Amino acid sequence: MALSLSGDEEEYDSEGEQRAAQRPKPKAGPSAAVKLPSNRSASGARRRRTRCRKCEACLRTECGECHFCKDMKKFGGPGRMKQSCIMRQCIAPVLPHTAVCVVCKEAGKEDTLEDEDDKFNFMLMECSICNEIVHPHCLKVSDASGVVNDELPNCWECPKCNHAGKSGKQKRGPGFKYASNLPGSLLREQKPAKEDAAADAAAAMSAAARRRPERDETPRSRGEDPQPRPQPLTLPLPLLSPRPRPEDKLRKKRKLFDDDEEEELSGRKKETPDEPYFSKLLHQIKTEEEDQDADEEEDGDEGRERRHRGGVSAERNGSLGDEAEPDDKDSRSALLHACVRAAAAATVGDSDQSLCSSPRAGPSSEAGSETQERGPARPKARRKRRLPHRELSRELSRALSSEIQETENCLANENQQPLREEPQTENGETHRLFRGGGELDQRHLKPREMNGTPWELRHFYPGPITPLGFNRSTPASRPPPPRPSACRCCDKRLWTKIDLNRCTSITPLMLSGIIRRQPLALDLSWTNISKKQLSWLINRLPGLRVLRLSGCSWAAVSALCTSSCPLLRSLDVQWVEGLKDAQMRDLLSPPTDNRPGQLDNRCKLRNVRDLRLAGLDITDTSLRLICRQMASLSTLDLSYCNHINDQSVNLLTAAGTTTRDSLMDINLSVCNRVTDHSLTFFKRCGSICQIDLRFCKQVTRTACERFIAEMSVSVPFRLTEDKLLQKTC
DNA sequence: TCCAACGTGAAT
DNA sequence: ATTCACGTTGGA
């Protein structure tokens, strides 16, 4: 029966007995009333948390379709479940306004302070163990520190509990709600998705996961760590030991991407009794931050992978550097949007770190040598505390709103220019949207295989030389090179981009982590992500600019049909199994759901500028739709599309089409039906900068040279490679 | 006062 | 483990 946080026992009321007809009431009767766990008795009941009202989820309208919406009276349901719409489950629930410090009885005062440390000391912190809510400043425990729980705003394990050596689920109150228990981690279940039941399934998972027991956060034994923890959260009590000890690392909380499975596997050794450490711990700053360099802890595969990629890159010998890639350029501008950048910078510590921890789920995790590889100490890092979640959410929301408006304005003006100039980055690293993402750039591919490649082979591309390559009459294709399947994170400092390319197993915790970071760019290419997962992701990433789904199944990609991606600029669906004209039609038609608040019946992908369709069996039917629906299209990759011919090019460049003026970069390499005639069509394109006709058997070099000569009056082109035309200057 | 929905126990 | 149910809390 109902639970009362006050602990008062209750009897079933008559209403309950009436309902018994529908559902048997608990036999336990009064015994079902609350029995507060003993660990709560000391500090009283937990404060229920409430919506932050600022996160993307909170800002949404109810979907009207999910399990919980259908239950609501407003949607004609019985109203028994009384749960939030699954699309609206807050990702950073906050303490209620009525929460006060148990010591001084006052509310949080962080808003009145400037200094980050002051803010922390005067904000309310709820202990996930004893539930006590205090201002850290009000704690007079001068020789202990708390462990900030980054998964939930205003949450920590208070110094008292730390001091007592309590940890994790051993003593945490039941139902303590972490972000990992929030919707983001609801996709733990990875059974094959019944696609028609995706929404309900998600709802069901949602309900379940919210009640999921806490993850064990028992400190784990690790190798020596002579270095200070990178990016620790600021803690209130000035008790830094000069050299954090190995145990420091032990105190790290489980991170988002640490699978339960991993924990179970590794727990045998890791969860050694750590009581002896606690006395030392009392004098240390503790955080739950994951090592920022976690991904560098990976075993040699990563290094080999990098080397491999480097080799591929050189071998590819593309005429354009990655930096010149339009979608990267576009992404860069988006990626460095000021607000988002600020938010990202403010949160870089935890976010990337935990994301980077994803490889740890793999067999090579927990490398004992990690600490040796870590960079030098960052003594200042502990002073840098990320923004509280609500601030961050506010920032993101503001940024997104403005971006959406900007995009719409941009469209209204038919302004094809990028939203922003490409900003300078600190080290240029962020110019690469995805690590290794350029591998999918068809411009850089020397084709070895045509589309029509069996799906299995699309997944397991052969090496540089493959029997298939020899068997085909077309030039040897160059499918994306094989790579280790370890999950990788990208830039460690920013989480505006998340690269899970070829990560064979997308775990629920990964999805949860993605949502929490609200990346602008997401690469899920060659993963086995399911429709349910993708749908869930998209619906929670309203600000997504770049989505790469190369090599995924149509079953998964079809998730795009029912979702709206208003800000999506770059979509990569090359080599998607089963993606043909009919599917393209579904993809380009307005969202299929007519839910309240989803009345936008414009093309879901209307803002896409960079569309990658390589290797698809699409025809002019799809191109007509593209011409009609994607007014901003500037980069189009149709390489390896066997049905594309001169008429297709004619369509794209016909009078009255927006693509005629918007197209800047078209890749028709290995399109064997394209002939010299297409080049005459391209003369009509006002913005064309690059035409890739490499390995088009029916295109001659002579025609290319003629095109250059004829265009030279207005636009100077040159052949940077055989049948690769690029505008000069 | 009303509505939304959190957090829990029981049923499945 | 998942789903259902609902008292109670929190905000408007």
Image (tube, coloured by chain):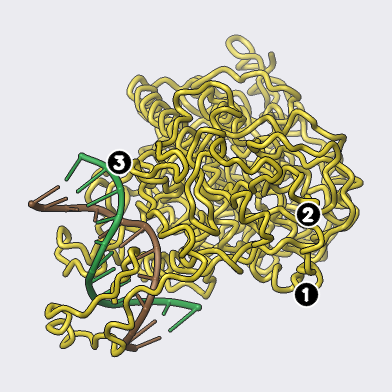
Chain colours: A yellow, B brown, C green
Q: Residue at x 45, y 46 (%)?
A: A102
Residue type at the position of mark 1:
Arg
In three-dimensional space, the C-alpha distance between marks 1 and 2, rounded to whole angstroms, equals: 24 Å
Could you tell me which secondary element the residue under label 3 belongs to? Answer: loop
Mark 1 / mark 3, whichever is N-terminal: 1
In three-dimensional space, the C-alpha distance between marks 2 and 3, rounded to whole angstroms, equals: 62 Å
Q: Which residue is mark 2?
A: A279
Q: Chain of mark 1?
A: A
Mark 2 / mark 3, whichever is N-terminal: 2
Badge 1 and badge 3 both on one subunit: yes
Residue type at the position of mark 2:
Ser
The percent position of residue A725, horizontal first and vertical second, equals 68, 27
The residue nearer to you, when weighing A31 against A316, is: A31
Q: Residue at x 14, y 64 (%)?
A: A76
Image side of residue A369 versus residue A426, left or right: right
The residue nearer to you, when weighing A94 against A557, is: A94
Q: Which residue is mark 1?
A: A268
Which circle, 1 or 3, is nearer the viewer? 1
The percent position of residue A24, horizontal first and vertical second, equals 24, 88
The percent position of residue A355, horizontal first and vertical second, equals 66, 49
Q: Are marks 2 and 3 in contact (CB under 8 Å)?
A: no
Q: Chain of mark 3?
A: A
